[in-house]
Image (tube, rainbow, N blue to C red):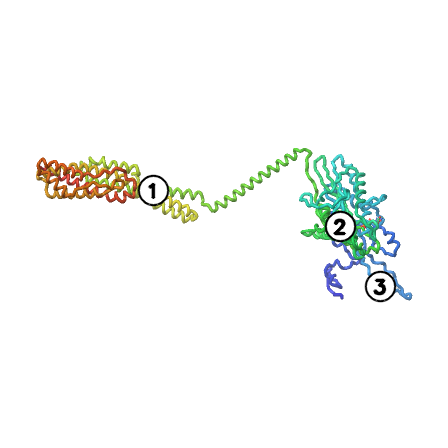
Amino acid sequence: MFRLGLLKVGNGLKMVKNKKDLKSPHRNRSLTGTRPISRIRAKGRNIRVIVRVRPPSNREQGENFSNVLKIVDDSTIVFDPKEENVPFFYHGVQQRYRNLTKRPNKNLQFTFDRVFSHEACNNDVFECTTKELIKTLMNGYNCSAFVYGATGAGKTHTMLGRGDDPGIIFLTMRELFKQKDELSQERHFEIEVTYLEVYNETVKDLLNPGPALELRENGQYGVIVAGIQVHRIDKSEKLFDLLEQGNKNRTQHPTDANEESSRSHAIFQVCLRMKIISTNEIRLAKLSMIDLAGSENGAATGYSGARFTEGVNINKSLLALGNYINGLAHKQRYVPYRDSKLTRLLKDSLGDNCQTVMIANVSPSSLSYEDTYNTLRYAIRVKSIKPNMQKNIVRSDTKLSHYVNLVDKLEKENEELKLELSLLYQQKNNETVTKDEPDPKLQTELQALYAEKRKLEQDILQLHNLRKQLNEESDAKLNGICTDTPDREYEHPRSLNAIDHLVRQIVNLQKDPVLLRERNEQLELRLKQFIEKTPHLKQVAQLDDSQVASTTANSKAECLQKVLDLREGEMQMCYQLIELFSKVLKPSILQLRSHELASEALISEYQGLVRQLQDIRSVTWDDESTVQTPIPSTDSAISSATDVTVESEENMSNKQKLLEKLNNTLTLPRKKSRITSIKTIMAEGGVMRPYASAIFSEIFHSVLLICHILKQN
Ligand SMILES: Nc1ncnc2c1ncn2[C@@H]1O[C@H](COP(=O)(O)OP(=O)(O)OP(=O)(O)O)[C@@H](O)[C@H]1O
């Protein structure tokens, strides 16, 4: 069923009959009656496709087969051309209707780079195909030539030829050696060849028959055949011997179309290494010449067993080759080449970096109608590959020193790059760390502020507490001791100077505590603002705060220790004075009493003083023995003293004893060891000191009173 539609052609519209024709205007028949199949003709010249039509075989000639190929010109061929309309007359009248029993002709026109008729010999083909490749090869490009076609289409004949018509391998190699000889003054050549076959997906060395060889892929050299024997040749004669030897080893079996059908793909590779003497340039190039196994229609052949397996493998690998070519033609991102050994081996002999010639061999006979059609379609697909050529050039020097210098240079460059990289890493790490760490400038400023604060705290403490306290105490002491101004002035050097000396050692008396306090307050405000502005320095500030607190505590402890040392000295002095005055007071009281000059008030005061001393006596120190001297009661002591004055001489010894008792009573125990424990001092010294001072004042008062009485009498 046909569907009608409109197809845009040029500026106008054209009626089309079916859906297929809607897809592309190229599907429409041309005005000449042939369909222009060469629509995907490649513009590039890196791949050239040649069609060679072989002469019809004896069988084809003998049987009633028609010719399905018509060569229009050097590059155009028509498959299944339309037959000329032979006028059909019925009863002498030309009929207008065609013969409906006859199959319509395909009449497909193909355009290739060159089309050779059955009259062309191998040399003609060579001149137009691989001869050009030699020039390319000499320039350092990879080249490949492969023959494709159905079984019996003339592939092996094209490649190998026969005695009177040598094949293109022979002709190409002869040309290669010819050009080599011509260029021998300019270049040094090294030519190595390998010859292998792919049969039933196994690779075999045709020049060194043995077990199947493995394919390996190398990043530098691509796909390589592990274990293949490489033959270095310098004469063309040697090559021909090798080729003959290889062809004998090739797998062949007769088919319907060919009694000597090759059942494997044969790959002949020539590796060319050229060194251009003037420039020391090295050019590497590879020429691959591939004789593909003939494609066949398995169903049509009716083979079974080994022949069938061969056919399947041949078709499979040719299909993989077709897909690979299709991928290249459509510039696919990934071109499948692992599907068969053949495509793996030809990976670098097709597509990019390679100049390729494909020779499509076809039979002209209608006996091979399908095969010829398929071959032509396959060939036109190959034509669409547009590879990008790359020259395989390696710069070189004859001198080893060049390589040494090159290696040195590269190593140096490598070291420099490594260094640069490590510096960049370092810089990056530093940047990361700096982001988290505070600015060192700010940190230094903060630390300076805290250092100042610590010093101020210390000074304030020392000035305020110690100096003030010691001065007050010094004044109080002088007031208690000195009876008049001259006495005070006399005592001053001994007591106050000692204290001031100590104070001077501790604090700088020139500093004003008020100013220091003000400065400290300013500093604290500044620190607060500083931390508000830079919160990330809070931790640093907290650390410094704790250091300030620690410094303050240490300063306080030092001050306290010094105060206590001073007090200890004072205490010692007090005890010495009490002892001294008690020696004066006791005889004075006795003397006054004997002369009846002691008033009741004086005696009462004296008794009170003795009682107080008894209380002092009961105090024990940390470092003293707890054993106490028995102390007589105050009353008994006084009464004893009173009795002494009225008794006889006999009783005087008793009085003396009593006086001694009184003397003992008034003698305070001397403190022998230095008080070191601040806690003990605070606990005991703090209580003891005012108590001792009070007694000291009492004694002074009593002594002064006695002195006054004695002076009056
Ligand atoms: N151009 C030619 N001129 C003369 N004879 C030819 C030509 N091409 C092919 N022949 C002959 O046709 C026969 C089959 O050719 P050939 O062996 O080369 O085919 P083939 O494509 O290699 O087949 P297969 O794939 O089966 O090996 C051979 O006898 C060969 O001599």
Please identify, in this view, whether the residue under mark 3 or under mark 2 is nearer the observer: 2
Image quarter of the C terminus: top left
Q: Residue furthest front?
A: 650
Q: Earlier in the sequence, mark 3 or mark 2?
A: 3
Tell me whether circle 3 and circle 2 mark residues in contact (CB < 8 Å): no
Please give the residue where the numbered disc 3 appears in the rendered image: 101
Image quarter of the N terminus: bottom right
Please identify, in this view, whether the residue under mark 1 or under mark 3 is nearer the observer: 1
CA–CA distance in space, label 1 to label 3: 126 Å
Tell me whether circle 1 and circle 3 mark residues in contact (CB < 8 Å): no
Q: Residue at x 87, y 65 (%)?
A: 95
Residue 567 falls in image quadrant: top left
Please identify, in this view, whether the residue under mark 1 or under mark 2 is nearer the observer: 2
- Mark seen at residue 684: none
| Amino acid marked by disc 2 | Asn
Q: Residue at x 86, y 56 (%)?
A: 65
Please give the residue where the numbered disc 1 appears in the rendered image: 554
- Neighbor class of circle 3 (other Cα within 10 Å; few <14, some 14-19, many 20+) is few
Kindly tell me whether mark 3's CB lies below 8 Å from ligand 1.
no
CA–CA distance in space, label 1 to label 2: 97 Å
Residue 205 falls in image quadrant: top right
Please give the residue where the numbered disc 2 appears in the rendered image: 200
Q: Position of residue 284 (x, y in %)?
A: 71, 40
| Amino acid marked by disc 1 | Asn
- The reply to whether residue 668 is visible in this rendering is yes
Secondary structure category for the residue under label 3: loop
- The reply to whether residue 110 is visible in this rendering is no
| Amino acid marked by disc 3 | Thr
CA–CA distance in space, label 3 to label 2: 43 Å
